[in-house]
Image (cartoon, rainbow, N blue to C red):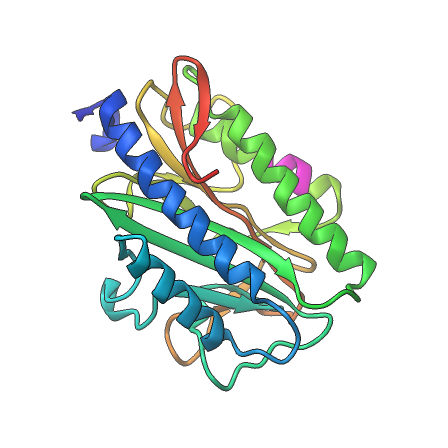
Amino acid sequence: MRECGLMAIMCKSPSEIEKMRRSGRIVRQVLDAAVAEVKPGISTMDLEKVAAARIEELGAKPAFKGYYDYPCVLCTSVNQEIVHGIPSEKRMLKEGDIVSIDCGVVLDGYYSDSAVTVPVGNHLKPEIKKLLDVTKASLERAIQAARIGSTVGDVGATVQEMVEANGFSVVREFVGHGIGTRLHEEPQVPNYGTRGHGPRLREGMVLAIEPMVNVGKPDTRLLDNKWTAVTVDGSFSAHFEHSVAVTKDGPLVLTA
């Protein structure tokens, strides 16, 4: 690992990226297990229990639990909750809800982080289905922008342009980040920006790119638990995330 550029951004070697890829595969398996359980009538704590058991079974450690005293291995954010929803036995999922499931693990000292937002049941309002489709597509486009010589601003602008063209808004208080031997490293990766601005991407950089998109206005507030961020106007929000390495062969999704 070496510093590459300003702000002590760490560039990983190919062997380190492979370690992060192994970590990322575990995150994907954990998310797949949790998503498979999503249905009306279960609680977000039910998802937490499935994920915690799967992380242990796969020989990794949770990245979130204990991080600044966060109590769980997942963040489960429902409907107007944007990020950092805390799993609870009392939070029951119902038909027409959406739930963001965010998970991170550490394996052999290397972190990975990924999130997906899924519908609960089969009767999703068309506007909310569009929200999920646009947010996921904005992540996919942003990943393709994560190439050597591009800038962090290029990545953020890619998200912002697609989201706003579809009538939604980008959350600004919460952003993506570098990732490696720590869960959060430099640089910050906003989901908005100006093309050509910000740190230039170099081989070996690893970014957690995570669009957070609201149906309504971008404004957010924190709940009394000091973790969960929600939309001020009560509109639904979606969140998708992948950990992505910048390589000479193009972007490599480590959490695929």
Provide residue 254's location: percent of width, then percent of height. 41, 35
The residue under the point 59% across, 67% down is 38
* Quadrant that contains the N terminus: top left
Question: Residue 12, located in which quarter of the rendered image?
Answer: top left
The residue under the point 29% across, 60% down is 56
Give above or below for 112 relative to 76: above
Provide residue 43's location: percent of width, then percent of height. 53, 78
Q: Residue furthest front?
A: 57
Provide residue 211's location: percent of width, then percent of height. 54, 46
Asked whether residue 197 appears in the rendered view, the answer is: no
Give above or below for 31 relative to 16: below
Viewer-proximal residue among 36 and 180? 36
- Check if residue 132 falls in the magenta segment: no
- Mainly helix, strand or loop, the magenta region? helix
For residue 108, side relative to residue 187 (left or right): left
Give above or below for 140 relative to 64: above
The residue under the point 29% across, 47% down is 184
- Check if residue 161 falls in the magenta segment: yes
Q: Residue furthest right?
A: 126
For residue 203, side relative to residue 223 (left or right): left
For residue 205, side relative to residue 173 (left or right): left
Asked whether residue 14 appears in the rendered view, the answer is: yes
Question: Residue 88, located in which quarter of the rendered image?
Answer: bottom left
**Number of marks in the rendered image:** 0
Q: Which residues are magenta?
A: 159-163
Viewer-proximal residue among 186 and 139? 139
Viewer-proximal residue among 16 and 159? 16
The residue under the point 41% across, 81% down is 224
Question: Residue 125, located in which quarter of the rendered image?
Answer: bottom right
Provide residue 212's location: percent of width, then percent of height. 55, 52
Viewer-proximal residue among 184 and 12? 12
